[in-house]
Amino acid sequence: MFDYSISTDKGGRKVNEDSAAAVQRKDGLYLFVVADGLGGHGKGDIASSFVTDNIVNSFLKTENIDENFISYSIEKAQKELVEKKKNMKDSMSMLTTAAVLVADDTHFQFGYIGDSRVYYFKQGKAFLRSKDHSIPQLLVENGEITEDEIRNHPERNKIVKVLGIEGNSFDYTISDVMQYKKGDAFLLCTDGFWENVVENQMEYSLNSFEKASEWQKNMCKTVSEKKNDKNLDNYTSIAVKTL
C-alpha cells in the first residue's frame, strides 16, 4: 500500500509542459509517471501528456505485468509519439522526458529517459536516484565535475536522450527489480523540481512529515519561494510513502 501525492505547477512559464499520473490496478500493482515536455521545441505539453497517457493505458491493458513492462511501455510510447508527429507533419517539436515507477507490495522497478528523476529513500535517506541523460551527468561520470555542480552547470538543460526523436537519441534506462520495506519512500520529479530542492532538503521533509502530501507540500514550498523568477521552470513531483 502507498500514500502518495501529485503536484504540478507552471512556475514562471506561460505554459505547463509537465505531466504526471498515478494509477492502481485491481491486482494491486501501482504505476507512477512524470514527463517533461522540452520547452525549447514547442508542443512539449502535447508530447508529455501523450506519453503519460500512453504508458498509463499500457499499464491498465497489459494482462500480466512483469520486469519487461516498463521497457515495453516506453518503446510503445516512443513509437506512437513518432507516428503522431508524422501525422501532424511535425518533425522537430513534441519531445519529452519520462520517468516511470511500477511497484507491488514488496518490490519496485523504475525506468526513465532524459533528466526527470526517480529517487528511492531507504530509512529516511536518499539511497538511490536515477542518473540523468544529460551533458552535466556525463561530466560527472567522467570525473570532470562533482554531483553537486550539476544543478548550476551552464549546460544543465542539454539532454542527450529523449522521447520523440527517431534514432540514437532514443535510449532509455531500466533498473533491476528491487525490494523495499515498509517506511521507505519514492519521489518522481521533473528537473524544475529537483534543481530547486537538494537531497538533504528532501530527506529533512520526508522525516518531518507523516503524510506524503505534507512531505510534498513542504518541498514545493522551497520551489515556490522562487516564483518571482520568470525563468523558474515548470515543476512536477509525485511523492510516495510506503505503508
Image (cartoon, grey):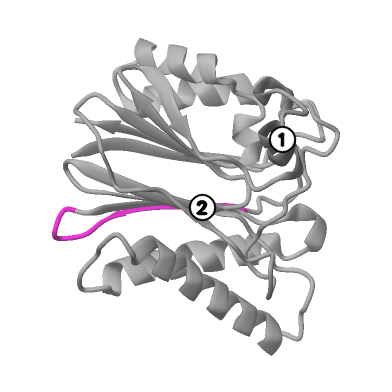
Question: Among all residues in the image, which is located at the extreme front?
Answer: 142
- Kindly identify the residue that appears in the image at 63 percent across and 66 percent down: 170
Magenta segment main secondary structure: strand
Q: Which residue is denoted by mark 1 in the rendering?
A: 142
Quadrant in the rendering for residue 73:
bottom left
Residue 2's place in the image compared with 48, above or below, is above
Left or right of residue 197, residue 165 in this image: right
Of the image marks 1 and 2, the number of the one nearer the N terminus: 2
Mark 1 is surrounded, within 10 Å at the Cα level, by few (under 14), some (14 to 19) or many (20 or more) other residues, namely few
Q: Is residue 241 visible?
A: yes
Q: Is residue 100 visible?
A: no
Residue 99's place in the image compared with 234, above or below, is below
Quadrant in the rendering for residue 57:
bottom left
The range drawn in magenta is 18-28
> Tag 1's secondary structure?
loop
Question: Among all residues in the image, which is located at the extreme left?
Answer: 27
Q: Which residue is denoted by mark 2 in the rendering?
A: 112
Residue 191's place in the image compared with 181, above or below, is below
Which label sits on residue 165?
none
Which of the image's four quarters has the N terminus?
Answer: top left
Mark 2 is surrounded, within 10 Å at the Cα level, by few (under 14), some (14 to 19) or many (20 or more) other residues, namely many
Q: Tell me residue 14's x, y (percent).
A: 76, 48
- Kindly identify the residue that appears in the image at 33 percent across and 37 percent down: 4
Three-letter residue code for mark 2: Tyr
Left or right of residue 31, residue 34 in this image: right
Three-letter residue code for mark 1: Asn
Quadrant in the rendering for residue 208:
top left
- Kindly identify the residue that appears in the image at 69 percent across and 71 percent down: 165
Q: Tell me residue 233's x, y (percent).
A: 72, 39
Q: Tell me residue 151's x, y (percent).
A: 72, 28
The CA span between labels 1 and 2 is 21 Å
